[in-house]
Image: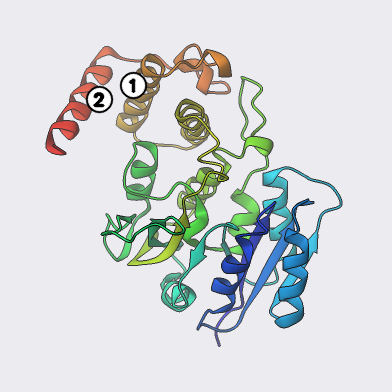
Amino acid sequence: MNELVSILVPVYNRAGLVEATLRSALAQIYTPFEVVAVDNASDDGSWDVLQRLAREDSRLRVFRNERNLGPVRNWLACLERAQGALAKILWSDDLIDPDYLRETVPQLGPDIAFVYTAAQVFEDGATPAAPQVLFAGPGGGAHASARYIEGALFGGDVPLSPGCALFRTADLRRNLLLQVPNRVGSDFSMHAIGNDLLAFLLTSREYPRFAVVERPLSRFRAHPGSITSNSSASRLLLHYDIARAHFVETTPLPERLVQRFDACLWLRLRRHDGTPFGLHRTADFYLHRRPAVRPGAIFAETARRLGASLRSR
């Protein structure tokens, strides 16, 4: 018998987009599943859309917060209401194909941390070109978790946000953190940059493998209202690095990876001004650790980046 899957849709001011998102969730071929949508005190009519769709389809369960809790608390509110053993977060501006659950659920074996599919970015009304396929790099099937970890730490072709992934509900409840511990006073519960990546990283260290479906069954909508569009490149990169540093600080990793990661932090601060975020030196990314950045590691990482840049031309 198939396990119940909870598709979790946190919603805030998505009246014009969320119906398409929910209909893509409800169109799943796999059974059984439920769709749980939690409205974070929207003021644009999103709650009306949710209520109308819930009256049409009993598989959709909708809830509304009395006040805006911030993004991460709303993600956790969705998780609290999940009844399934498996959970898939679907951002309220994105879509999944009808085959999404049918293709991913069978891949989530007992030694698999999570399953994600390839994804494509789309814009409403844009003329379709040859769409870029994201996250297909490792190839289909199961891979060592170390491969995901290295890709996530160093900018590989792996997802940082769970919008294309399927997890066990218990793992998400344990590893989707409200706050990322940090020494610069950044409130990760409100800006939500990095909590998503840590859900992947913390889960990946608990299982030997992860799995990939090469078909692009996830569709990410590009639009001005998305969190990514509303955040500067420096803010995104540096806060994701704080989340990565938390993982590095709390996880036994090969020394070569730690040295390389510290070199990446050093180089990041040479390219991006961390002063507005309290980031002045490599140690500021960590809560307790005092890294000694080695010149050889910096040279090796610089050479690695130059080589990658030349190969991409």
Image: 53 above or below 229: below
- Side of 46 relative to 88 (left or right): right
**Image: 306 above or below 194:** above
Which residue is label 1 attached to?
A: 263
Q: Tell me the kind of residue under disc 1.
A: Ala
The residue depicted at 38 percent of the width and 21 percent of the height is: 268
Point out which mark residue 301 bears: 2
Q: Position of residue 75 (x, y in %)?
A: 67, 52
Quadrant containing the N terminus is bottom right
- The image position of residue 258, as x and y in percent, is 37, 29
User: Label 2 vs label 1: CA separation?
Assistant: 7 Å
Against 206, residue 19 (above or below) is: below
For the C terminus, which image quadrant?
Answer: top left
Residue 245 visible in the displayed image: yes
Disc assigned to residue 26: none
Mark 1 lies on a secondary structure that is helix
Position of residue 42 measured from the top left corner of the image (x, y, whole percent): 76, 52
Q: Residues within 10 Å of mark 2 (few under 14, many from 20)?
A: some
Identify which residue is drawn at 48% across, 68% down.
96
